[in-house]
Amino acid sequence: EINNGGAEGAAAVLTELTASDQQIGADVTGFLDNLSSGGTAEIKASFVTRLVGSTANKLSIYNDGVSGSSTYICFTPKSSSFREEAWKRCSVEGAVSTILPDDFPADACPATDCGTAVAALGATACMICLP
């Protein structure tokens, strides 16, 4: 289980994936290295290289550490259609949505840019988060 927030119930944060050998939570092996090597090789090493490359759209991982909570991979969209989707999830009539899942990363909907934006065009910090 990934708990980038520390102990159960501690404040969790979005953690940007920056290197293939980056440790997340209590893992002793790099998170992405675990997925791309060994007997399982769930994803190709070349894909990991693209994920953490300097020109990549950065990904962040989030889990609040509570048993049964979802783990989310989040990114800030570049396309207008994904930006609108993120804004609609985070914002209701110019305020931060109160109907997000309990385990959803609050940092994915920053109130100063995303939650209070009156249109998707101005909501440049809203993130798409996939469980």
Image (cartoon, rainbow, N blue to C red):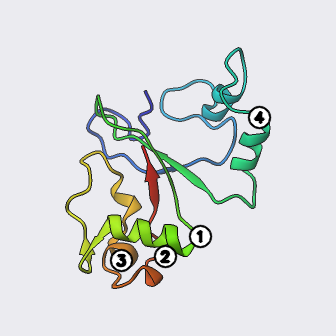
Give the vertical position of 39 relative to 90 (above or below): above
Name the residue carrying label 4.
45
Residue 20 point in image, percent of width and height: 70, 38
Q: Quick check: marks 1 and 4 in contact, CB under 8 Å?
A: no
Q: Residue at x 26, y 38 (%)?
A: 9
Q: Secondary structure at mark 1?
A: loop
On the image, numbered disc 1 is attached to which residue?
A: 78
Which numbered disc flags the more N-terminal residue, 1 or 3? Answer: 1
Residue at x 24%, y 47% (from the top left corner) = 102
Badge number at residue 22: none
- Tell me how far mark 4 sits from mark 2, CA to CA: 31 Å
Name the residue carrying label 3.
Answer: 112
The amino acid type, in three-letter code, at marker 4 is Ala
Which residue matches tag 2?
Answer: 124
Farthest-out residue, top:
39
Q: Earlier in the sequence, mark 3 or mark 2?
A: 3
Discs 4, 2 touching: Cβ within 8 Å: no
Q: Quadrant of residue 36?
A: top right
Where, quadrant-wise, is the N terminus in this rendering? top left
